[in-house]
Image (tube, coloured by chain):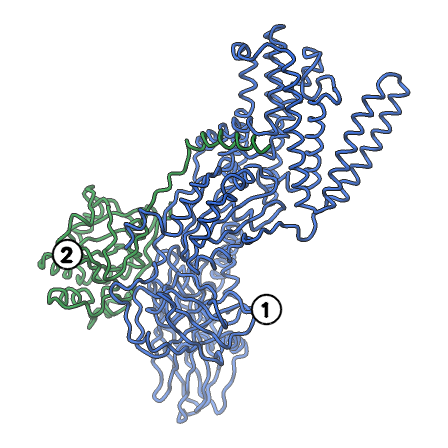
Amino acid sequence: MESLTRQTFIAGLAWAGLSLTTVAAFAESAAHVGQPAPAFQAVDADGRTRSLSEFAGKTVILEWTNHECPYVRKHYNSATMQTLQKDMAKDGIVWLSVISSPPGEQGYVEGLKAKELTVQRDAAPAGILLDPNSKVARAYGAQTTPHMYIIDPKGTLAYMGAIDDKPSASPSSLNGAKSYIRQAVAEMKAGKPVSEASTKSYGCAVKYAPQS
Amino acid sequence: MIRHASETMMRQRDRREGRKTGAARRLLGGALLALGLALPGVALAAESAPVTSPRVTATLLSGRDTVAPGERFHVALVQKLAPHWHTYWLNPGDSGEPTQIHWTLPEGAKAGEIAWPAPRAIRVDPLVNFGFEGQVLLPVEIAVPADAKPGETFSLKAEATWLVCEKICIPEDGTFTLDLPVGPAGVTDEAAQQRIDAALAALPKPAGFRGRLAADGDRLALALPGLPAGSTDLRFFPVSDTLIEHAADQPAKPGDGPGVILTRSSAFKLDQPEISGVLTFREGGEMRALTLVADADPALVGKAAEAGAPAASPPAARIPVPAEGADLTLLAALAFAFAGGLILNLMPCVLPVLFIKALGFAQTAHRSRAETREQGLLFLCGVLLTFLVLAGAVIALGALGSSVGWGFQLQSPPLVIALAVVMVLIGLNLIGAFEIGGAVVGVGDGLASRGGRLGAFMTGVLAVIVATPCTAPFMGAAMGYAVTQPPAVALSVFMALALGFALPVVALSFAPGLLRLLPKPGRWMLVLKQAFAFPMFATAIWLIWVASVQTGPQGVLAALVAVLAAGFVVWLVGVTRGGLARRAFGTVLAALVALGAGWFTVENAVPGADTQARAGDVQPWSPERVAALQAEGKPVFVNFTAAWCITCLANERVALSRQEVKEAFAELGVGYLKADWTNRDQRIAQALAEQGRAGVPLYLFYPGRRDGQAEILPQLLTPDMVIAAARRAAGRDAKTAANAP
């Protein structure tokens, strides 16, 4: 019995070899301020594969977005987001908008539509990353739209959290709101540590694709 | 409110099954809503006109019809939510925004803060929100100024904003007005007051003790010194949204005194020496909620999430592992089933039966090719029909709602014993203790006779029956797929399995060339035939051991009595051949013995109360145990097994109980849990189903961190494979270490 069981086992192994689940050794990457920002690869709205490494030496801002989310709309309808994007571009900062909604969920768009939205809203991201399987979102632990991340030229995460300190969907909340992004970028430029480097983001939940 | 919370959590869990009832409820809700909308203006004075959307029907409810000068009373903002939609608590969790009310009141009147009911944790994987589903009342205390004059009108205006989310979020707002007359004395609206009183009664109560918050490595330990003993299902909802990771599990704090371990927020910030929040827990079957204030360790205060501090992983970070079986395509399932069927031929309980069948072909090959082919096809019919019956049983039982899987038949001790008896009889036959004219195993004379045809068919039936204890590799995934599919698909998977199983014998019957590879029939066949008796006896021993695990000593007694009776009956039938009288006597006696033994077996083979085998450092499995060990940072290995599962036992023997595996587990601090499915168990069946499986074995390796997703190991293990998985789960994998932040 014992030896037969073993024979069976070995014979079965040959079969099992055919179908062994290739367990991809995905590194557990989580975003922590002060540590290297998780690497990513994603296709942009033009169909090109972009990765974090190509922006080495530049400051990168990631903006999680969902054009139908009321909190995102607050920032775009008032043009505060576009102004911020343009101001950052002037400083040589690479702004990447990330769309992590899977097909069928709110906010999901294909490249063409994403570019159309940029034109319509007069937005100025350097690129729009399409992340329909939410991989980049999982790597960064993005929770809300908007959810903002600043990566310094050395690839270290310098800021993660809310876009400003007024967690509301109401346009009036923009009055007197403090932009954590402007504050962090100014401090980085001055060579100072970011005073509020990690804040609680607010907004709509990121619509995660089911984990496959 | 709290009771609602537990109901909702259960509802979420049962949502998959509960779709139909959910739809009915929605329909009913819609009808009631329509009825309410059809009666505008009849809202009583104590309740404002409703503000409605497809998601929320909100009103402002007053406990008073008439207010008295200087009194305090409660109003409540009522939100009736459509199914699956929620509004948010004071701290909304990972996303969202709490309901807010802006009051416009008569001069001198005051409105208090919202008295927040205990929230529920609403999971929208991988995020968790804190909020409310169903219906929620947000009570607010109103103070009437002492100089209010009877005869005047006390006008309340509440401008409320709330975010209501399902997956998508809609900000909504409403303005509610109540014009209440001022009288010399307050007049209570009984119905409204009852609803408000119920909401107030369900509010979290002051804890009566202070908690203590301290650092626990990179996590936080919240000590709860006054928590009632025996409380379970603890969850702490902090008011601050920068204290903890909302989606992280909150395992019990190890060490002295009750408490929970919390995962620090990635935006951790604590500027005050105390924190506050709501604590929910179960005590004696009832959900309770307390408002808690805890003193924070001074070392924590003023500390933001430090740059470079090794904060715990946010819940979003998980290792994606392809779930084998869960999303097989039909084609893949058919292929797996076919391959699994082929492998079944090699199982120790099946191989002898089939080998003897093949030898039968060798013997008859010289006679007629047509006959051999006929034999092969009849065997195929036997296999297909038996699989059809078994598949029908699995599907029918599944449709009746019982959680069965492949191998379910072995969860019945009488059936296990019956199989043991069959094994012994086959063994006796092989060794030559009795002959049944080839009717069972198709060896001997009269192969071309009617008996031979029946024999071929019966060999097919028998082969499937003796194969049932064995689950071949791939069968697990295919079966798991099959039982979740419509009957037609499930049947085709079973048929693919049957075809794979029958293929070698059928091929042999059609390809005489293959037969020529066998040595010429001779004495060696007899020796081999006798030798094959021993695997059958061994299988019988194993089945009796299974019965012993299921039923204890009584089961062994029952099984051995059954075997004895079976042996006696076949011997009796053999010796009473000849005269009619002798044969009649023999048959009657045999029938009596068989009946008596059968009764004795069934009587004694009833599972005992607690017969689960519990081995030393192996702990029994439960989802809670997995979560608790993960929270302690330990990788967890779960072995879904059963005493009747031969693949499981093989794996335990060649991999899991090997010294090097034990040593690796000890070194990496792996928690080894065993889910024993020898007897039926709803929770285990459910856990298997969640992994897309219908049977055992299933091996899962969970990483040693909260909410870490399990890696599914193959169904055939080697020590190296298990150790490598253990290292991955413990984060000691070379690749993982290099890339880890």
Shade representing chain B: blue
Q: Is residue B602 left or right of residue B20?
A: right
Q: Is residue B76 above or below residue B83?
A: below
Q: Which residue is mark 1?
A: B284
- Front in this rendered view, residue A162 or B294: B294
Q: What subunit carries mark 1?
A: B
Label 1, secondary structure: give it: loop
Q: Residue furthest right?
A: B581
Q: Position of residue A23 (x, y in %)?
A: 37, 41
Q: Residue furthest bottom?
A: B147
Which of the image's four quarters has the C terminus of chain B? bottom left
Q: Position of residue A130 (x, y in %)?
A: 25, 47
Q: Is residue B388 visible?
A: no
Q: Which residue is mark 2?
A: A153
Query: Cα distance, mark 2 to mark 1?
Result: 57 Å
Label 2, secondary structure: give it: loop
